Image (cartoon, grey):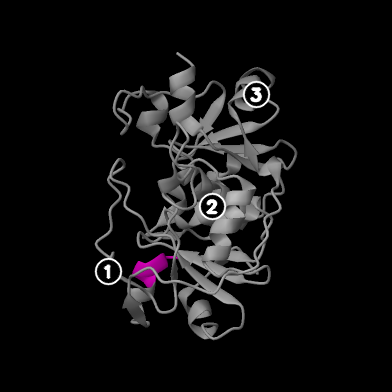
Amino acid sequence: MDSLVTVDWLKNHLNDSDLVILDASASDIISGNVSELDTVKIVGARVFDLKNDFSDTTSLYPNTLLSPEDFELACQSLGINKTSKIIVYDNLGVYWSPRVWWLFKAMGHVNIAVLDGGLPEWIHHNLPLEENKKETYVRGNFTASFNSEMVVDFNSVLENTISEVAILIDARSQGRFNGTEAEPRKDLRSGSIPNSINIPYTTVLDNHKFKDKTELLQLFENVKNDVQPLVFSCGSGVTACILLLASELVGTKNKKSVYDGSWTEWAQKVF
């Protein structure tokens, strides 16, 4: 399955066996990304609580990756199976959903795609909705097979500032990257990781959808080689996944990973 599908595709496959639709909508008060579409969801969608059920809430840093064991159990409770064909979306168009796409990829489940344009695009086409509420499901048999190469930690990023083996790409705004704009998290300095480059995640989107391949290729012109690994970072590991997915859409062959702690961790450990 492709990593990105249209609302027309989903409309035509709503009755597919093993289809699971995940609503990954959330409110990000810190960044100001809040949607007014919080009372409805796509018909048949299951609420995917990224903040509470699919992040390590004991971590010092937000949105931290769950252990494979806990991720597996949380997926099973949503009725997700090994054979499930998953479509994930959110109510901001494209914001949280690529993070969920990456989570499943990192846990070894390749049959997952992001709905381009998300809930706003679905509503724009007058497609069926239902009340947004959590439900219970027959426990699934999902199993996680963690791919450690899809995530890097602080020490790896620190080493890379010297070796520059990988290209570190920061998805935050240019102002935050350059240290001229305050971070949204209180008392967190702005700035950037040494020897990283900046591609703001907003530049790969147009009207809440991904830009076409030609436009995306221009944005990735500084990382056209297929040799160096790409490491994606942002404020807390969410919008980094938007860039990672964009790089997949243009067909880059590089090994790709996410610095899960991202700037929130780096800025607190390196002064």
Pick the front one: 53 or 131: 53
- Looking at the image, do the residues carrying marks 3 and 2 touch, with CB atoms under 8 Å apart? no
Location of mark 3 (residue): 160
Q: Residue at x 72, y 49 (%)?
A: 253
Is 190 rendered above or below residue 237? above
Is 205 rendered above or below residue 255? below
Amino acid at the residue labelled 2: Leu
Is 6 rendered above or below residue 145? below
Residue 127 numbered tag: none
Horizontal and vertical percent for residue 155?
A: 62, 23
Amino acid at the residue labelled 3: Asn
Residue 216 numbered tag: 2
Location of mark 1 (residue): 39
Instruction: Tell me, yes or no, if residue 250 can be seen here.
Output: no
Pick the front one: 198 or 43: 43
Query: How many angstroms separate mark 2 from mark 1 (CA)?
Result: 33 Å
> Does label 3 or label 1 sit earlier along the sequence?
1
Q: Which residues are magenta?
A: 116-121
Q: Residue at x 40, y 62 (%)?
A: 90
Horizontal and vertical percent for residue 11?
A: 48, 82
